[in-house]
Amino acid sequence: MSLTPIGSFMPTVTLLGTAQDGGRPQPGCQRPCCADLGAADVRHPVSLGITDEHGQGHLIEATRAMGEQLKMWGHPPLQSVLLTHAHFGHVDGLGLFGRETLNARGLNLYASSSMLSLIDATPQWALMMEQGVFTPISVSTGSEHALSENITVVPVVVPHRAELSDMHAFIVRGPNRSLLFLPDHDRWQETLDHHGAPSIRSWLTALKVDIALIDGTFWSADELSSRTQHEVPHPPVSETLERLGPRTEGDPEIVFIHMNHTNPIHRPDSDEHGQVTALGWSVGEQGMTFTL
């Protein structure tokens, strides 16, 4: 049964970026994947905008492309920022909330204790805390946080390179549907073992999500010519498709996000993109929205 939102807006989420931390084109890349890209081919680092029933905005990830992302989103009044982890493209826009740019005050900043400790230890970010730009709120796996009367978020810890902080995905629960935001993790087997789940489907069922935006960084394990996937671990899309097979009745909607500039699924005319959609799954597009 659908519930009527309290405010005048139906809660929605908007995908504000679909690329891995370096964006597309990636700085310094002269390979065919980045050469001669037009304005329509530019992809921002991954980020998600949540609009609650009052029209207030809640931003997951703070990227350097925030200006374009807020414009795409329609500039809702921001109430909170949520961070999954400390890797570059997910936090390099934090400084934009400071006096030099947005001059924000009292934004709720949801992050894990290790992420908040890193902020306190980073002079520029620590100064912003002292100036009252953010109100820190520590999250941990399984804790539930209300962003509004109709929107709650639940952090879910997942294994990922923890040089600077741990990594939490977020479940966003609305009045009618729930969405998982999982831009990064190392390997499916590690994530599933950590949560005691035998398969991707069983894990998503246990999380009770209707939509899953999941790590699609690389198409295959041999995609990086200069570095091994052991150095930059992410589950390849090809492996995820093997584990999932075709979409069946009752499955959540699965959308691949956080694509590296080398990933061929960026191109709708690629064979790899066609393999994703032929199985009933989707590739994320900037600006796509989901009603909760």
Image: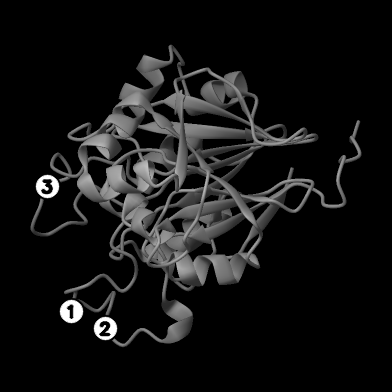
Q: Is residue 216 visible?
A: yes
Q: Dot 1: what SS?
A: loop
Residue at the far left in the pictured view: 226
At x 23%, y 40%, the residue is 233
Please report whichever mark, 2 or 1, sits nearer to the chain's N-terminal start.
1
At x 33%, y 65%, the residue is 23
Please report whichever mark, 2 or 3, sits nearer to the chain's N-terminal start.
2
Which of the 4 image quarters holds residue 112? top left
Q: Amino acid at mark 2?
A: Ala
Q: Position of residue 178 (x, y in %)?
A: 67, 34
Question: Label 3 near label 2: C-beta < 8 Å?
Answer: no
Q: Position of residue 287 (x, y in %)?
A: 60, 65
Which one is in front, 39 or 98? 98
Q: How many marks?
A: 3
The numbered dot on residue 228 is: 3
Q: Amino acid at mark 3?
A: Thr
100 left or right of 205 in image: left
Question: Label 1 near label 2: C-beta < 8 Å?
Answer: yes
Residue pointed to by mark 2 = 35
At x 28%, y 77%, the residue is 34
Pick the quarter of the image with the N terminus: top right
Please report whichever mark, 1 or 3, sits nearer to the chain's N-terminal start.
1
Q: Is residue 284 above or below residue 215?
A: below
Using a 10 Å C-alpha cutoff, classify the residue at mark 3 as few (fewer than 14 neighbours), some (14 to 19) or many (20 or more). few
Which one is in front, 238 or 5? 5
Closer to viewer: mark 1 or mark 3: 1
Which one is in front, 68 or 230? 68
Pick the quarter of the image with the C terminus: top right
Q: Amino acid at mark 1?
A: Gln
